[in-house]
Amino acid sequence: MTKSELISRIADLNPHLYLRDVEKIVETFFEEISGALERGDRVELRGFGAFSVKERDARTGRNPRTGETVQVSAKRLPFFKTGKALRDRLNTDE
């Protein structure tokens, strides 16, 4: 599902809201999650999952094309761990 599909779905389920308001709500939601991760905070959505930031140390890597060793700098990466309710929902036998 893309962001525009999500906006359309929310708008369809809430006909009392204007489409521009739904767009603003979804955009604000993603901005708040991004901002929290940028600050190093953890974002937990009960029953869905948790977003956090993982730190990767600098290391020596290898260019697969040339075989030459290269230095890979340290970086921060977003990480998502599913919640138990979501895992259970995905793995139910129906």
Image (cartoon, rainbow, N blue to C red):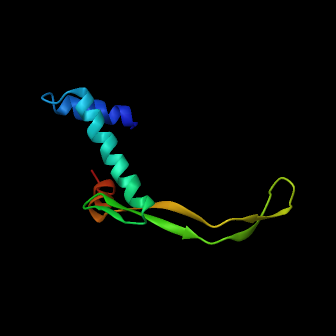
**Residue placed furthest toward the left:** 16
Q: Quadrant of the N terminus?
A: top left
In the depicted view, which residue is nearer to us: 24 or 66? 24
Measured as percent of width and height from the top left, residue 77 is found at: 53, 61
Q: In the picture, residue 69 is in which quadrant? A: bottom right
Q: Is residue 56 left or right of residue 79?
A: right
Rendering coords of residue 60 (x, y %): 75, 70
Q: Is residue 63 above or below residue 58?
A: above
Where's residue 33, x and y in %? 36, 54
Q: Is residue 76 left or right of residue 23?
A: right
Q: Residue 90 lies in what quarter of the image?
A: bottom left
Q: Is residue 60 above or below residue 92?
A: below
Q: Residue at x 15, y 27 (%)?
A: 15
Give the residue displayed 31% in from the left and 44% down from the top. 28
Name the side, left or right, on which 13 lies relative to 31. Answer: left
- The relative height of residue 25 versus residue 54 in the rendered view (above or below) is above
